[in-house]
Image (cartoon, helix red, strand yellow):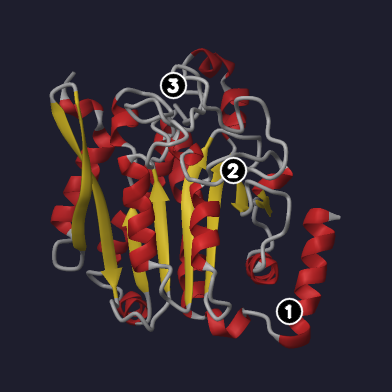
Amino acid sequence: MPAKNLPELITLKRLIDEGAAHLQVATPCSVAMDGRDFPVYTITLGNPDPQVPALGFFGGIHGLERIGTQIVLAFLESLLARLRWDHSLHQQLAALRLVFMPLVNPGGMWQATRCNPQGVDLMRNAPVSATDRVPFLLGGQRYSRHLPWYRGAADAPMETESRALCDFVTRELLPRQFSLALDCHSGFGLRDRIWFPHAHTSTPIPHLADVAALEQLFSTSYPNHNYVFEPQSRQYRTHGDLWDYLYLNGTGSSERVFLPLTLEMGSWLWVKKNPRQLFDRIAMFNPTAHHRQQRVLRRHLTWFDFLMRATISHQSWLPSGMARKVQHKRALTQWYG
């Protein structure tokens, strides 16, 4: 199979070369299969000072969901192009740390599977067990690697790709006073959704008021947006969610705020427009028409840019005092009522 069949990795390498003057690049691990070695890249950009806030973009955790990697790459490409002329972007990056992990699971993408080459679903792989009932199989299972949503053996360490993501987040995001992460997926529903923890329980997170304030800020700034904001547990609960694990480990200090979000693109809409995609496991999770793919790649840029501005300006909108109580109560009514 020629290397051109993994165009996302080729694009990522091209962007790394083009942005060499601005990017710090590392390869925490690689995945060997079919006689090839696929690197897993991490990229950092902007101010490295640990006192500034940070924002992370992640994609390709599930190998079938190529569009997640593609929109992260599209955003990175836009940033690199703007750095040639946009003085305001340079000012933003002086007050912000950006981190990218665009293709977490290249082995899964190469073999066109949700799981990694060991048959493990990386989003069921963290050492977190649900406290509420989970859907059969979908919530994560340990029966067999030959069945979907396999968590891995109970006594096994986390998969190499999972550990690389967790180490990267632990080093770049969790030590800061404020950090935010966006993980890009597809495969659920007719609407684009912004999910936040928890996935392992329906209990609200301690930073519910902060998420509510962020949602309100975006909705008032862009009142015509089409996103549905909600906790993932509102749709289904799972074992082993990586972001639950990182959130639980990163919020031990009440002075620090870490908000991990998931963009879950509504791929059912693409299938609705072209039902034949049901018979193609890749097309079920990705737009196949070129014009539709282009629309998806540009429609989320407003959200990405908003997250940059909100991260830099977090002290202006994070609620405190009575405002925090009001936001918490509003969120309980809206998402848990």
87 or 142: nearer the eye?
A: 142
Task: Give the structural element (helix, strand or loop) at label 2.
Answer: loop
- x, y percentage for residue 300? 50, 52
Question: How far apart are labels 1 and 3 at the CA level?
Answer: 44 Å
Q: Quadrant of the N terminus?
A: top left
Q: In the image, is residue 173 above or below residue 273?
A: below
- For residue 324, the mark is 1
- Identity of the amino acid at label 3? Arg
Q: Residues within 10 Å of mark 2 (few under 14, many from 20)?
A: some
256 or 10: nearer the eye?
A: 256
Q: In the image, is residue 83 above or below residue 186?
A: below
The part of the image, by quadrant, that contains residue 44 is bottom left
Task: Give the structural element (helix, strand or loop) at label 3.
Answer: loop
- Identity of the amino acid at label 2? Ser
- For residue 145, the mark is 3
Question: How far apart are labels 2 and 1 at the CA level?
Answer: 30 Å
Does residue 250 appear left or right of residue 8 in this picture? right
Which residue is under mark 2?
129
For the residues carrying marks 1 and 3, which lies nearer the camera in this image?
Answer: 3
Residue occupying image coordinates x 59% and y 17%: 275
- x, y percentage for residue 6? 25, 31
